[in-house]
Image (spheres, helix red, strand yellow):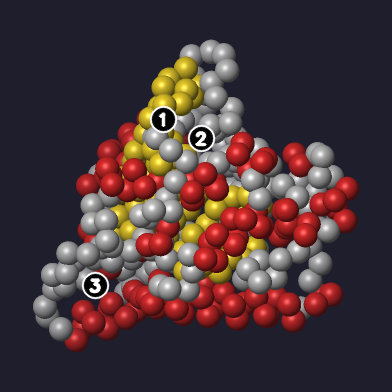
Amino acid sequence: PTDCVSTKKQPWRQKCSFTYATRCPDNPWLEDYFHSIHRNRIKLASSTSSSNNNNDLDFLSLFIGCNKGMDAVNAMRMGSGNLIFDKEVWRKAMSKSEKLHSDVCGQSLTTQFSLDNNMSASSSLSYGHHRAKVHCVEPMPATYHKLNRSANELGWDARGFVVTHAAIGKEDSIASFPADTTAGVENIGLANGCGSGKCEDVIVYSLDTYMSKHVKGNNSPIHYLSIDVEGYDYDVIIGGLNDTIGRVNYLEFEYNWMGSWAKQSLLEAIELLDQKGFTCYWPGTAGRIWRITGCWMDHYNIHMWSNVACINRNSQGMVSVGRDMERRFWNTLRLGKELQINSKSA
């Protein structure tokens, strides 16, 4: 807390306990869950010759602020169990003819969701890959064009990887974004606008509007919602309160000092999500996690860049994920003074 307080007027320095802990987190509780899902599907396939004719998607995910698409591709691989969705294949497609802007968290180099031929839905189940859908929503023109071209060239758009050129905010509108930036730049959003240079108007949807216009099956669960929109994350949540947020099983979003977050309260966001059935945590690395819901500390309201992960307690299908997150939270606490995270160890 000391670092958070001493640098609260200089948030760009990223000197805060929950920034150190969550700046580039992982989510092994989610990966473990989908590993078990795919193992169970293999057992089902080996025990019956009939295909699954249910029209509901086995996996639906939205990445709001998709950037280079690395995390979205990994989610598609995780949700579908299909080996064709590979981050290295995607990185090469995205890097063709032009160098991408560098990653803040190095997503292009981090380990992807592990699958082998025995676990892959494409090899074990005739209905596997086409039952997953990931929406990759990106407002930056140069980045969107790279994403869209790569998805088309790889044929992934026909397999459920949907790229949309749009921004998501609190309400429907139009916003201007720079059209001449390097593809993959990560620090420009609604807060920055276009400024000078070549600009392009981009449609802005509320989350509820986007779902009604672009996602079929409005009653199906959203297994994984990721929000990374450079300071407007809570606005996205607010814009989805009527029809969307209640359908989300697992939610990740950024907390920040930019954009709307500058005048918004994390405590208010956590309490609102709690009312909607979500328990929220600071996700770290190596399976470490700290609960926020019911464990509030005053310095959390100091606006610093960090990440929050929430599980919907009302989701019957992902009860095991919530239990795993809570188990890991208590295991993290048991480390006590053995676990010290600062700017050098993060």
**Circle number at residue 124:** 3
Q: Are marks 3 and 1 in contact (CB under 8 Å)?
A: no
Q: Residue at x 12, y 80 (%)?
A: 49
Mark-to-mark CA distance, 3 and 1? 45 Å
In the image, is residue 225 above or below residue 100? below
Check disc 2: other Cα within 10 Å, few if <14, some if 14-19, many if 20+. Answer: many
Instruction: Name the one closer to the observer, 168 or 328.
Output: 168
What label sits on residue 334 in the rendered view? none
Task: Say what secondary structure mark 3 lies in.
Answer: helix
What residue type is disc 2 on? Gly
In the rendered structure, the answer to whether residue 282 lies left or right of residue 171 reads right
Q: Residue 195's x, y, as percent?
A: 57, 17
Query: Going by the image, does 134 lie left or right of 271?
Result: left
- The dot on residue 173 is 1
Residue 235 is left or right of residue 40, and the answer is right
Quick one: SS at disc 1?
strand
Kindly identify the amino acid type of the residue bearing the numbered disc 1: Ser
At horizontal 38% and vertical 30% (from top left) the residue drawn is 203
Residue 184 is labelled as 2
Residue furthest out toward the bottom? 47
Q: Give the crowd class for mark 1: few <14, some 14-19, many >=20 residues within 10 Å.
A: few
